[in-house]
């Protein structure tokens, strides 16, 4: 199974929610944006992107709509739901707390 | 999931489930869009279109895998997979109908038998009585000198009521058999006199009318009745205006004040076949001769006060009883009371038997599971290629286990469905044919509880017999199976597993068959018991006189007329009248006080069954007269009082002496002496398995009853005689109700019907177990032989004799069978003691039964393995070597 093993569990969800919070995007656009914002640090294969998106959809955090793209093809656009916004706020707060705590630990000088 | 989720997710789930094609299409389109964009991107970067497409694909990873993971995200994949597995399973079953049939039938037998017994246990034992706070309801008994429970008397009952603080009330009842005078006929009813508090105590809600008033529980004001629901329906057609109407009972008219609800159980009836029809107030007072302190004929019911435990109530009542014993030392034989929860009293007798039956039927189900597991193993082995192929194509192991478990659940549910039909027929049969005399039988239904139970055991059995083959199949070695080369020698492990199944089958079957054997032997022993009379060619029926005719002298005269008419009928050899029939369910006992042998406290003198008889009775029943004379014309109301005693009584009071001419009193210590004129043989009164009792026969001229049984011995078919006897009696007086027409053989048979029922069920379960075991062993061995055809061919080709092959195959079957038999014997040795209470004159470790069952099972195992083994010896080495 191709799970993004180098991503902390749940981090991918957070990233996707954050990206979609900015504007509704289709899957391909999400993959571009993901690469763009994280550089090559976060490796998410295209194959694992879609199951993650579908999972978020099934959780009710994002919703999908078929819309024409600029080049006039049908694509599935995802956008955040009200529930998803709340979840994102909660998770971002958690993430900040967690990462702050971890970086504090990491910065500890050995005695 | 939180409710606000639903608005988003429920439509998605439903869409995933019911618009599956659309969803799949969307998924493909979405991924395709991604791939196309990527391809464009790379093409724009300068790759050829082909290279770009390949690179896009490569980066994406497995498209199908991604799709699968997306499907998993839908959260309905379990349901979809299940439905898919189910469909697949059904198709598979259709391709192997023989396998499916055997498996489903096996399970139907196992599950059906369990369901039937469970529904009986649920209805009889588990369901609460329809009374509020039924746990507070108790039966209250006096304790006699032997520590047994005994009825109480009115005087004691009044004292108990006055002195206790533990109960909200105590109510008492006595038997009452009024004659109902209908417009066309008369009928003897089964009724009770009940103190006015009884129905309040039980918390009965009347369908119509009300309970008795305290003012009606007084002599002279007591001509009111409450009808049972059944009697109200039967005789009044459920008349909604019946309250206030009058009912003619004997020569008196009674006003109906209430009707009991339909579910009022036959709590008070001592014959579950005939629930009580009618109730009237007890209305005793101290002046009545049968209200005395040692006139023990009342049954007492009590309800514990809120928060008072039964033990505390018993302690208080014991104290009260001790005080009464001190106060009236010659009117009690012992001090103390016995408190029995009402429900235990009602069903206590059949409790052990029913639980033992459930246990044994559980073993039947286990055997069924073992067999089906074996069938599934064989089936799974036949599907090795399919399984291997699916595994090679990337099916997950869990997914394959799920597939197999779904299939076994499908089997068990199909089996359960048929089992339910079996159970339903069984219960209907039980109620219609009344195979057993079970209390609360009308309460037994195939209901939601039964469904839940059946569904539960279906799931359990499905898992029990399905998991093992599933794990085995999923674990299989791909290379071996795809090559199909693993057939020359059967895997050692597989062989061990099959041996284990034979072992389990035989052990379980031995256990069950031992139980069946013991129960059958016990029942046969019971039937061999000599009851002390000859039940063949004898017709019995009950007559009830009422009104002026029920007075002593007219009754005796009427009975004489009846006997004269009946004796004149063709084929009749002798006829007589008796006040209670042996094995007929009556318990009419009187204390006997023998001259010179009375104890200081006459209450401690023993009691004897009392039969008032006419001259012909002993001859009609062929009860032997051992000494002295029978009653004859000399013995009239005014002549000296005489009696016959049975052998037991003669031996007890006059050992080594001639009892003839000895005297005793009955019941009353001040009554007239009765002189013994003869000794009759012992008759079993309470049951074929009961000990002999003391018995006294009196001429009906000197102790007259109005409710009697007529016994007629004929040289022809006794049942055919019933119509003419009936018409002779009707010719004398059409208003005399006749009931309980039965041959004496039927009476005896009815007295052992519960034992017969138990023995029959055990026999049935044992037979099923034996059949399943035989089929199981046969299946295991023939499958093993089929799998090893190749190996056997080689052996034969290399010069092994056919006898050797035969011995080898049978030996391999018999080793686990013998081990199983050994374990089964040990288990049976330990478990059959649970049957002790159900066995008559058979030890739970009866050696002949154990040996017989062992031999039977070994024989069956030999036969079941011999047939496939013989087939193995007929293998043609050339064919076998080519066989795949």
Image (spheres, helix red, strand yellow):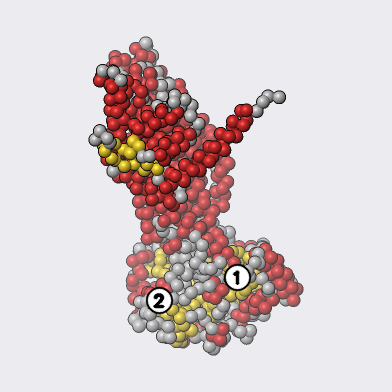
Read off the residue under disc 2. B232
- Residue B586 seen by the camera: no
Q: Nearer the viewer, residue A110 or B354?
A: A110
> How packed is label 2: few (under 14 Cα within 10 Å), some, or many (20 or more)?
many
Name the front one of labels 1 and 2. 1
Q: Chain of mark 2?
A: B
Q: Relative to residue B461, is residue B628 depicted above or below? A: below
> How packed is label 1: few (under 14 Cα within 10 Å), some, or many (20 or more)?
many
Query: Percent from the top left, x then y, of residue A21?
Result: 41, 40
Q: Chain of mark 1?
A: B
The residue under the point 60% across, 64% down is B340
Tell me: B94 left or right of B508: left
- Residue B207 seen by the camera: yes
> Where, by quadrant of the figure, is residue B110 drawn?
top left
Query: Percent from the top left, x then y, of residue B30?
Result: 30, 34
Q: Nearer the viewer, residue A33 or B537?
A: A33
- Residue B108 numbered tag: none
| Dot placed on the residue nearer the N-terminal end, 1 or 2 | 2
Secondary structure beneath dot 1 equals strand
Q: Looking at this view, name the residue that lies furthest to the left.
A: A72
How many angstroms separate mark 1 from mark 2 (CA)? 28 Å
Q: Quadrant of the C terminus of chain B?
A: top left
Read off the residue under disc 1. B303
């Amino acid at each position: 199974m191709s799970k993004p093993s180098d991503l902390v569990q749940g981090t991918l969800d957070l990233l996707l929610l954050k990206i979609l919070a900015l504007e509704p995007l289709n899957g391909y656009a999400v993959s571009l944006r993901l690469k763009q914002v994280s550089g090559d640090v976060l490796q998410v294969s295209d194959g694992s992107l879609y199951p993650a998106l579908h999972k978020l959809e099934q959780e009710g955090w994002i919703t999908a709509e078929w819309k024409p793209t600029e080049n006039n093809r049908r694509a599935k656009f995802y956008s955040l739901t009200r529930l998803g916004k709340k979840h994102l706020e909660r998770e971002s707060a958690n993430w900040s707390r967690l990462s702050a705590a971890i970086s504090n630990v990491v910065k500890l000088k050995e005695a | 999931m939180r409710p606000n989720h639903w608005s988003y997710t429920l439509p998605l789930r439903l869409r995933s489930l019911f618009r599956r094609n659309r969803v799949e299409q969307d998924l493909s389109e979405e991924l395709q869009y991604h791939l196309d964009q990527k391809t464009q991107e790379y093409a724009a970067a300068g790759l050829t279109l082909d290279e770009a497409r390949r690179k896009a694909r490569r980066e994406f990873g497995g498209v199908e895998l991604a799709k699968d993971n997306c499907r998993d995200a839908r959260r309905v994949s379990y349901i979809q997979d299940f439905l898919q597995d189910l469909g697949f399973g059904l198709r598979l079953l259709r391709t192997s109908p023989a396998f499916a049939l055997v498996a489903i039938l096996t399970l139907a037998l196992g599950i059906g038998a369990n369901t039937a017994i469970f529904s009986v246990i649920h209805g009889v034992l588990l369901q609460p009585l329809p009374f509020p706070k039924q746990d507070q309801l108790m039966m209250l008994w006096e304790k006699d000198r032997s520590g047994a429970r005994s009825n109480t008397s009115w005087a004691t009952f009044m004292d108990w009521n006055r002195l206790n603080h533990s109960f909200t009330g105590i109510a008492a009842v006595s038997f009452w058999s009024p004659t109902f005078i209908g417009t066309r006929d008369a009928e003897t009813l089964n009724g009770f006199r009940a103190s006015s508090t009884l129905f309040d105590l039980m918390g009965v809600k009347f369908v119509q009318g009300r309970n008795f008033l305290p003012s009606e529980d007084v002599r002279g004001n007591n001509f009111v009745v409450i009808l049972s629901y059944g009697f109200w329906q039967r005789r009044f057609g459920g008349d909604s205006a019946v309250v206030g109407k009058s009912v003619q009972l004997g020569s008196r008219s009674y006003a109906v004040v209430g009707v009991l609800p339909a579910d009022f159980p036959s709590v008070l009836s001592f014959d579950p076949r005939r629930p009580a029809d009618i109730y009237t107030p007890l209305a005793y007072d101290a002046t009545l001769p049968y209200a005395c302190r040692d006139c023990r004929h009342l049954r007492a019911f009590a309800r514990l006060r809120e928060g008072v435990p039964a033990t505390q109530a018993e302690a208080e009542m014991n104290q009260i009883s001790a005080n009464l014993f001190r106060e009236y030392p010659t009117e009690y034989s012992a001090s103390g009371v016995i408190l029995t929860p009402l429900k235990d009293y009602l069903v206590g007798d059949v409790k052990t038997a029913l639980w033992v039956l459930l246990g044994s039927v559980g073993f039947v189900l286990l055997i069924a599971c073992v067999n089906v597991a074996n069938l599934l193993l064989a089936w799974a082995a036949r599907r090795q290629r399919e399984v291997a192929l699916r595994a090679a194509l990337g099916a997950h192991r869990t997914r394959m286990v799920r597939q197999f478990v779904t299939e076994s659940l499908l089997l068990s549910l199909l089996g359960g469905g048929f089992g339910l039909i079996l159970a339903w027929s069984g219960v209907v049969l039980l109620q219609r044919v009344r195979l057993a005399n079970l209390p609360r039988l009308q309460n037994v239904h195939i209901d939601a509880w039964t469904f839940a139970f059946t569904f539960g055991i279906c799931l359990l059995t499905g898992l029990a017999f399905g998991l093992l083959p599933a794990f085995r199949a999923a674990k299989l070695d791909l290379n071996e199976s795809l090559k199909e080369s693993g057939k020359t020698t059967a895997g050692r492990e597989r062989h061990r597993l099959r041996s284990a199944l034979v072992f389990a089958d035989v052990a379980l079957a031995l256990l069950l068959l031992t139980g069946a054997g013991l129960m059958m032997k016990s029942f046969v022993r019971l039937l061999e018991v000599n009851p002390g009379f000859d039940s063949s060619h004898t017709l019995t029926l009950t007559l009830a006189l009422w009104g002026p005719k029920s007075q002593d002298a007219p009754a005796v005269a009427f009975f004489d007329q009846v006997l004269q008419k009946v004796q004149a009928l063709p084929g009749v050899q002798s006829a007589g009248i008796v006040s209670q029939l042996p094995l007929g369910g009556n318990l009419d006992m009187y204390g006997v006080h023998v001259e010179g042998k009375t104890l200081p406290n006459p209450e401690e003198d023993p009691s004897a069954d009392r039969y008032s008889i006419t001259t012909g009775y002993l001859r009609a029943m062929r009860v032997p007269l051992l000494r002295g004379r029978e009653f004859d014309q000399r013995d009239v109301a005014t002549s000296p009082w005489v009696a016959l005693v049975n052998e037991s009584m003669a031996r007890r009071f006059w050992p080594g002496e001639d009892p003839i001419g000895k005297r005793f009193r009955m019941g009353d210590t001040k009554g007239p002496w009765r002189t013994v004129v003869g000794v009759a043989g012992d008759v079993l009164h309470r049951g074929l398995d009961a000990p002999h009792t003391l018995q006294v026969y009196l001429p009906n001229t000197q102790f007259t009853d109005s409710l009697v049984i007529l016994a007629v011995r004929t040289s022809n078919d006794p049942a055919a005689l019933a119509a003419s006897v009936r018409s002779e009696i009707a010719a004398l007086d059409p208003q005399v109700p006749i009931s309980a027409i039965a041959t004496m053989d039927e009476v005896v048979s009815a007295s052992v019907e519960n034992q017969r029922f138990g023995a029959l069920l055990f026999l049935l379960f044992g037979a099923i177990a034996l059949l399943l075991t035989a089929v199981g062993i046969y299946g295991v061995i023939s499958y093993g032989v089929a799998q090893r055809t190749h190996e056997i061919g080689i052996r034969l080709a290399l010069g092994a004799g056919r006898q050797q092959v035969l011995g080898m195959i049978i030996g391999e079957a018999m080793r686990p069978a013998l081990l199983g038999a050994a374990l089964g014997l040990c288990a049976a040795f330990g478990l059959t003691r649970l049957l002790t209470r159900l066995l008559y004159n058979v030890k739970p470790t009866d050696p002949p039964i154990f040996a017989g069952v062992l031999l039977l099972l070994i024989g069956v195992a030999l036969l079941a393995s011999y047939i496939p083994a013989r087939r193995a010896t007929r293998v043609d080495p050339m064919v076998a070597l080519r066989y795949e």
